[in-house]
Image: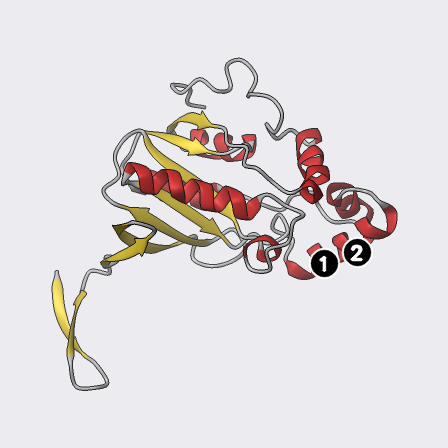
């Protein structure tokens, strides 16, 4: 249901009384799209927000994205996160519908300060940041994708195409009963990012090869 609310300048604005997120339009490149922005997870590092583009249905594109201040805001050359984000939005925009779930998971969920400590140790020891987390006594990866998966369930879809190289994201969505077709994306990165990609590959991400047989079955639910 809709109701009017008075603005500070004396004007009026139509809002949703039942809490439904308002649809608005964004312009990106040579097209504009209807988008809806909604909270995910109610706060905390595994929460964030979701941007739904257009009208989603089964087999829509979905990107579950962990925030990276260094890559997305500072534009450093040492990671692939910024390229993954922009490429995913390009693909969703091209199709006219899809979902981008952005989670506040800086530093694989460790937070900015622990991430900075690990980067310093990495530069001092020439070890990758996964190893440095372990040396500092941190979990290698704090992240959970349960809130993201539950949001996708709430959209009413039963099958998605997930833009990812991370098996943990696939498992989280499948564990919520949604069939996943993996769309593996490797974006061009500067030479400085190659050590990080090799480290992710050693930790089980699908960087240089496809998912193992059976894992990429689009009909699999587990």
| Most foreground residue, 71 or 140 | 71
Q: Which corner quadrant holds the C terminus?
A: top left
The reply, left or right, for residue 179 in relation to residue 71 is left
Q: Are the two marked residues, 1 and 2, in contact with CB atoms closer than 8 angstroms?
A: yes
Q: How far is mark 1 from mark 2, CA to CA? A: 6 Å
Relative side of 158 to 62, left or right:
left
In the rendered view, would you say 90 is above or below 29? above
Near-viewer residue (192 or 216): 192
Q: Tell me the quarter of the picture where residue 115 sits.
A: bottom right
**Res 73 label:** none
Q: Where is residue 81 in the image (x, y as percent from the top left)?
A: 56, 46
| Residue 4 screen position, x and y as percent | 13, 73
- Give the position of the N terminus as an image quadrant: bottom left
Q: Which residue is identified by label 1?
A: 116
Which residue: 48% across, 46% down? Answer: 85
Asked whether, in this view, residue 100 is left or right of residue 3, the answer is right
Residue 218: quadrant of the picture: top left
- Secondary structure under tag 2 reads helix
What residue would you read off at disc 2?
120
Q: Nearer the viewer, residue 144 or 210?
A: 210
Q: Which residue is situated farthest in the bottom direction here? A: 9
Residue 18 x, y percent position in the rendering: 20, 60
Above or below, 96 relative to 41: above
User: In the figure, 78 relative to 43: above or below?
Assistant: above
């Amino acid at each position: 249901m809709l109701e009017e609310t008075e603005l500070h300048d004396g004007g009026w604005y139509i809002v949703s009384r039942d809490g439904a997120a308002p649809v608005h339009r964004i312009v990106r490149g040579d097209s504009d799209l209807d988008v809806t922005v909604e909270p995910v997870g109610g706060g905390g590092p595994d929460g964030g927000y979701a941007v739904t583009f257009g009208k989603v249905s089964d087999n829509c594109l979905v990107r579950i994205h962990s925030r990276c201040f260094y890559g997305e805001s500072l534009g450093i050359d040492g990671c692939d996160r910024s390229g993954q984000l922009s490429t995913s939005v390009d693909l969703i925009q091209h199709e006219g519908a899809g979902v981008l779930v952005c989670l506040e998971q800086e530093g694989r969920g460790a937070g900015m300060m622990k991430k900075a400590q690990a980067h310093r140790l990495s530069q001092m020891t020439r070890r990758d940041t996964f190893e440095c987390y372990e040396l500092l006594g941190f979990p290698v990866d704090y992240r959970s994708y349960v809130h993201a998966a539950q949001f996708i369930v709430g959209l009413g879809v039963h099958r998605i195409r997930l833009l990812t190289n991370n098996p943990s994201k696939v498992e989280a969505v499948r564990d919520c009963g949604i069939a996943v077709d993996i769309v593996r994306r490797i974006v061009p990165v500067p030479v400085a990012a190659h050590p990080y990609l090799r480290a992710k590959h050693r930790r089980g991400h699908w960087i240089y090869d496809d998912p193992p047989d059976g894992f990429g079955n689009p009909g699999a639910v587990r």
